[in-house]
Image: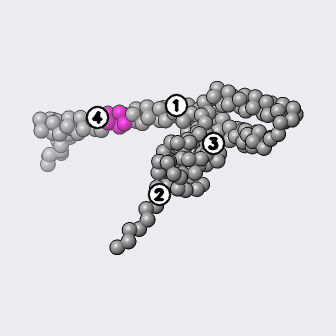
Amino acid sequence: MSIDQDNSGHTELLELEPTVEELQKALDAAEHKAQDNWDKAVRAMAEMENLKRRTQKDLEDAHKFALTNFAKEMLSVLDSLVLGLQAATGDSEEVQKFREGSELTIKQFEAAFARFKIETLDPVGQPFNADHHQAVMVQEVEGAEPNSVVTVFQKGYLLNGRLLRPAMVVVAKAAEKPLADN
């Protein structure tokens, strides 16, 4: 509705009705805006679901790998026990008792590691895996498959499938072929 005033000073109410075309344009605009808002709501819900999943995974990882630093510290203690056992030579009764005690302590360490899903990497004879092994030396070894582990200087460990410490290994290389005389 609008108010119109003519030359004589009389005011008159004029009824303006929107056209079908104007109503269609308004409806299209409203539908477009509703669709945009729907899309935004769906994206926001998907983002919230993704955030929930990421948070859950982070929480699970925190529980799963909470022992990482502690386990790394215990590895050095276990290494010292193993080195002490290797150094204990002789046939005296005291040395034998020391060896037995050290072996039992090492078994207890290994049992505790197994309970907390710490796996030992002792890859002798296996193919070299750069993700789990650290090559300290490469040497030609007769009868050994090239690129296989021939000696382990220090065992490696995984915690719930994640590398805790790589195994320190010697890797076999292919035998060098003598150059043929031309």
Residue linked to disc 2: 175
Q: Residues within 10 Å of mark 3 (few under 14, many from 20)?
A: some
Residue lying furthest front: 181
The span shown in magenta is 37-43
Question: Mark 1 or mark 4, which is nearer the start of the sequence?
Answer: 4
Hey, which quadrant is residue 101 in on the image?
Answer: top right
Q: Position of residue 150 (x, y in %)?
A: 56, 47
Q: Please say if the residues under marks 4 and 1 sit with CB atoms less than 8 Å apart.
A: no
The amino acid type found where label 3 is placed reads Lys
Q: Earlier in the sequence, mark 3 or mark 4?
A: 4
For the question of whether residue 164 can be seen, the reply is: no
**Secondary structure under badge 4?**
helix
Which residue was labeled with disc 3? Answer: 155
In the depicted structure, whether residue 136 falls above or below residue 160? below
* Circle 2 or circle 3, nearest the eye: 2
Which mark is first along the chain, 2 or 4? Answer: 4
Residue 53, given in percent of the width and then of the height, sits at 47, 32
Q: Secondary structure at mark 2?
A: loop
Tell which circle, 2 or 1, labels the residue nearer the N-terminal end: 1
Q: Tell me: 35 left or right of 72.
A: left
Of circles 4 and 1, the one toward us is 1
- Secondary structure type for disc 3: loop
Residue under numbered circle 4: 34
Magenta stretch: includes residue 31: no
- N-term mark: 2 or 3: 3
Left or right side of 63 for 112: right
Report the number of discs: 4
